Amino acid sequence: QVQLVESGGGLVQAGGSLKLSCSASVNIASLNLMGWHRQAPGKQPELVASLAKSGSVDYPDSVKGRFTISADNANNTIYLQMNSLKPEDTAVYYCTVQGSVTAWAWAWGQGTQVTVSS
């Protein structure tokens, strides 16, 4: 059972920055994929950043150039640096991982709220 614990959410003004952290209970170097999803009220979850085992990263156009995903394998921690935040970035952000330990499905943390005021 993979456990993911996010932290670092909060309230920030538009244009500001936040850095989310995710502490994983597994060796993240063994994972196939690490990511951050977000879900705004009334909307479907959206993958906003992914980091593959190969080191390749991917972002949707909505956050490209503003968000950066990274990982600290030694401490089994995944990060999401968010800059130039916009009110439309307001959502619950979830740390998500995928690999053999999750039966190749996305495993989710409990989420952390990010609110961007205009």
Image: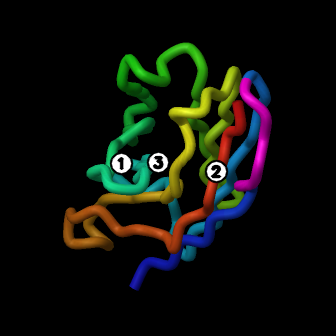
At 35% from the left edge and 42% from the top edge, which residue is drawn? Answer: 47
Between marks 3 and 2 in the image, the one whose residue lies nearer the viewer:
2
Between marks 3 and 1 in the image, the one whose residue lies nearer the viewer:
3
The span from disc 3 to disc 1 (Cα, nearest Å) is: 10 Å
Q: Are marks 3 and 1 in contact (CB under 8 Å)?
A: no
**Residue 12 among those drawn in magenta:** yes
Instruction: Specify the quadrant that holds the C terminus.
Output: top right
For the residue pair 71 and 43, the one nearer the viewer reads as 43
Tell me the number on the disc at residue 36.
Answer: 3
**Residue 76 among those drawn in magenta:** no
Q: Circle 2: is it few (<14), some (14-19), or many (20+) Cα within 10 Å?
A: many
- Name which residue type carries label 1: Leu
Residue 67 lies, in percent from the top left, at 58, 27
At 42% from the left edge and 58% from the top edge, which residue is drawn? Answer: 96
Instruction: Specify the quadrant that holds the N terminus.
Output: bottom left
- Name which residue type carries label 3: Trp
> Badge 1 is on which residue?
33
Q: Are marks 3 and 2 in contact (CB under 8 Å)?
A: no
The span from disc 1 to disc 2 (Cα, nearest Å) is: 23 Å
- Name which residue type carries label 2: Val
Q: What is the magenta range?
A: 9-14
Tell me the number on the disc at residue 114.
Answer: 2
Of pointers 3 and 2, the one earlier in the residue sequence:
3
The span from disc 3 to disc 2 (Cα, nearest Å) is: 13 Å
Q: Are marks 1 and 2 in contact (CB under 8 Å)?
A: no
For the residue pair 111 and 69, the one nearer the viewer reads as 111
Q: Main secondary structure of the magenta part?
A: strand
Q: Is residue 3 above or below residue 31?
A: below
At 60% from the left edge and 38% from the top edge, which residue is drawn? Answer: 70
